[in-house]
Image (tube, rainbow, N blue to C red):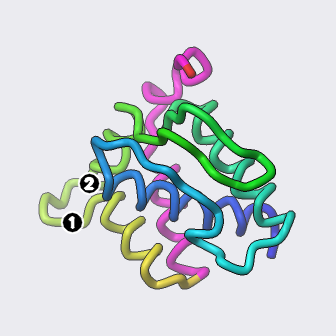
Amino acid sequence: MSNMDDFDRYAVFIFDDLLTAFPQDSVLGVQDFEPERNFEGVSSFVGTAQFLRREGFIHFEGISETGGIIYGATLTMKGLTLLRRVPGTVSNAASVGDKIAQAAKSLSKEAIKAAMGELFNSVSFDMLKGASDVAM
């Protein structure tokens, strides 16, 4: 698997877990998603979480980089808004978060890629503006 495949897979799992638990904080571990983890899996999981945090989609209190565990994780307002967005003009369409949840359950590489593509395609320039200014 490529780094982008790992990113898409872990991002889907992180977003699904945090949306399900919202507004409560969560403890997320790579072992929740991949019981047979290896060093590369832990590294990819941690890198994905750090990227999502840096870009303002999630917040967490702490991280165990060697164990692949994130403590006190929750969606930010930006992350919640993005996941609750319904793409296009169809009012009864599934939200981006619904598609993320479906992809997480299916474990299909294609469904995960499609859900992540839809998520990042729905990010508007207004949401991106100031993303690096989000408090961590």
At mark 1, the secondary structure is loop
Q: Outermost residue, left direction? A: 92
Query: Is residue 98 shown left or right of residue 39?
Result: left
The structure residue drawn at horizontal position 42% and vertical position 59%, both measured from the top left corner, is 17
Mark 1 and mark 2 lie on one chain; the one further toward the N terminus is 2
Front-lying residue, 60 or 131: 60
The structure residue drawn at horizontal position 34% and vertical position 58%, both measured from the top left corner, is 97
For badge 2, the amino acid type reads Val
Query: Is residue 62 shown left or right of residue 103?
Result: right
Residue 88: x and y, percent?
28, 55
Position of the C terminus, as image quadrant, is top right
Query: Is residue 81 shown left or right of residue 93?
Result: right
Residue 33: x and y, percent?
58, 71
Q: Indicate which disc residue 112 carries.
A: none
**Callouts 1 and 2 close, C-beta under 8 Å:** yes
Badge 1 crowding class, 10 Å Cα cut-off, few under 14, some 14 to 19, many 20 or more, is: few
Residue beneath disc 1: 93
The structure residue drawn at horizontal position 61% and vertical position 21%, both measured from the top left corner, is 132
Q: Which residues are magenta?
A: 109-135
The structure residue drawn at horizontal position 68% and vertical position 59%, both measured from the top left corner, is 7
Residue beneath disc 2: 86
